[in-house]
Amino acid sequence: MVERTVNHQGLPQLHSWLWEKPQITFDDLKLEYDAMPVEERQRILREKYGLQLQGDEIVETPQLIADSLASMDSYIDDIEPKEAYETALFINPGHVLDPDFKLAFLRADSFDVHNAAQRMVAYWERKVELFGAERAFIPSVSTMDLLVQDYPALIQGGARWIPRRDEAGRAIIFRYMKYGVNSVDSMMRLNWFVLHSAIFDREFGEEFQKNGFVFLAGNGLVDRLLPFDSIVDMRKYLAGVSNDAENILPFKTKSMHVFFPSRNVIMGKLLEQLLSNVCRKIRLRLVFHDGSNTENAIRSLENYRIPRDSIPVELGGDLSFNYKQKIYEQVIHDVCTVMGRVSVDHLSTAIKELLFHLMET
């Protein structure tokens, strides 16, 4: 558990790192946009707004898929070292060599076979780092792969896959961070669980792989936006999120929307620290919304093809769903899978009760 220093009102005291000079300011971001080739700038804007021009979408012909998978295998063979990948291949070859699994990596890199091969090798190294060798080589990332210390983050909904798509067919991930409950590694493992659930969803996974993901970072008090006491932890988390998105996990980030509660000096410095500690890919896809006026913020999101009924009530939208019930059902499903059960009906009432009480703690 991350310890926090709070004042007499229960709010975090101002962090010294907020007053450090940011490496990138809003003025720097504007200069970066202005210096960008017009074609690249327009492409990023289309991604943020959920728009497509003819030629933006890759036509996945059987020949393109077959040739790309073969080339990807060839590139992987040439990568050294790749110990984690080779271990995964030895333990679970059916999963590692599954064309559908590999195709997710190709889609994440727009069928750049060299980058896709690098991403897959890095994926297994990172998975071992986060989950340990005893859990890393299981095909999916389920609630059973999380560590005991990760469950507070899971139960509180630090990151959630919204059960809706936006108007561009993109997956929506809602981040709602709170202080004093999670380590950086716990939050990273939660990110992996949530993203895997969407990337490899049986019904919409292929669509999400093709159309990408949008992220909504929750509005609220300062403590929800400052989950770390030290700049070391903050940078470690943002570096991990950035690296996973840019180089490791098989998905495409289209936009990241950050709600902030008010316009003031502290928020400005916080947001510039955010700009300074994420990768270029995410930085150029960040969109900031003034959450002090909920209706205006919702209308702003609608401009990016994220409709009101796909925006959680926590942000002022119309989407309300029982998150804890969803996680409870997921835990039951995952326990059944681990136990080799055919149906959740075979799961004993005692275990269901135990899980229910776990979710209530």
Image (cartoon, helix red, strand yellow):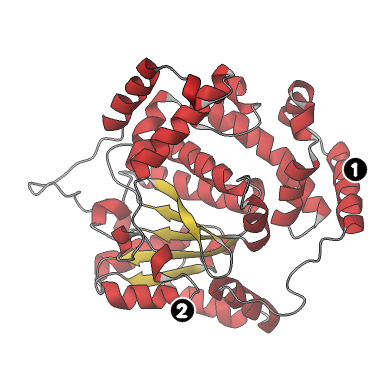
Q: Position of residue 7 (x, y in %)?
A: 12, 47
- From the viewer's perspective, tell me whether residue 79 is left or right of residue 188: right
Callout 1, which amino acid? Ser
Residue 38 visible in the displayed image: yes
Q: Quadrant of the N terminus?
A: top left
Q: Position of residue 189 (x, y in %)?
A: 49, 37
- From the viewer's perspective, tell me whether residue 217 is left or right of residue 246: left
Q: Nearer the viewer, residue 182 or 296?
A: 296
Callout 2, which amino acid? Asn
Q: Which residue is mark 2?
A: 303
Q: Quadrant of the C terminus?
A: top left
Q: Position of residue 62 (x, y in %)?
A: 88, 56
Q: Position of residue 335 (x, y in %)?
A: 50, 23
The local crowd at label 2, few if under 14, some if 14 to 19, many if 20 or more residues have their Cα within 10 Å, is few
The answer to which quarter of the image holds residue 270 is bottom left
User: Does dot 1 land on a helix, a strand or a loop?
Assistant: helix
Residue displayed at 53% across by 68% down: 285
Residue 157 visible in the displayed image: no
Q: Which residue is mark 1?
A: 74
Residue displayed at 76% across by 52% down: 106
